[in-house]
Image (cartoon, rainbow, N blue to C red):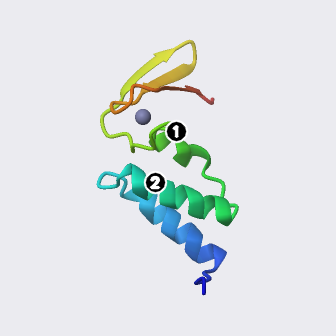
Amino acid sequence: MKKTISKTEVQKEILLFFSNLNNKTPKDVKKIKRLAMAYNFPLRDLRKTFCKKCLNPYKNPKIRIKKKIRRITCERCGNISRWKIKK
Ligand SMILES: [Zn+2]
């Protein structure tokens, strides 16, 4: 039997997770990503807090800003994520 939880509870759990990302592992990120997907919860900016390749939460990433594009280099796998800076 699968435990069902409400969407509000899922949202709470996800936000709590991202507010305390420092002690999280890529495995935890994978779990929360799956949870968000299952409940159609848009992660939006929260997706920028971890590497999309190895799912490592960014702790001390290299960030470079060039031409309104922020480049974040993952300290774990070296994958570069680019985000447009919104105004
Ligand atoms: Zn990575």
The disc at residue 52 is 1
Q: Is residue 62 left or right of residue 14?
A: left
Q: Position of residue 27 (x, y in %)?
A: 41, 55
Q: Is residue 16 left or right of residue 33?
A: left
Q: Give above or below for 54 relative to 37.
A: above
Which residue is pictured at 51% across the width and 23% down the height? Answer: 70
Q: Earlier in the sequence, mark 1 or mark 2?
A: 2
Q: Residue flagged by tag 1: what amino acid is it? A: Lys
Determine whether the beta carbon of the residue marked 2 sits less than 8 angstroms from the nearest atom of ligand 1. Answer: no
Determine whether the beta carbon of the residue marked 1 sits less than 8 angstroms from the nearest atom of ligand 1. Answer: yes
Crowding around mark 2 (Cα neighbors within 10 Å: few <14, some 14 to 19, many 20+) is many
Q: Give above or below for 53 relative to 6.
A: above
In this view, which residue lies farthest toward the top?
67
Q: Residue flagged by tag 2: what amino acid is it? A: Val
Q: Position of residue 78 (x, y in %)?
A: 39, 25
Q: Position of residue 50 (x, y in %)?
A: 45, 42
Q: Quadrant of ligand 1?
A: top left
The disc at residue 1 is none
Residue on which disc 2 sits: 29
Which residue is pictured at 43% across the width and 61% down the height? Answer: 17
Instruction: Give the position of the N terminus as an image quadrant.
Output: bottom right
Q: Which element carries disc 1, helix, strand or loop?
A: loop
Which residue is pictured at 60% across the width and 81% down the height? Answer: 5
Instruction: Give the position of the C terminus as an image quadrant.
Output: top right
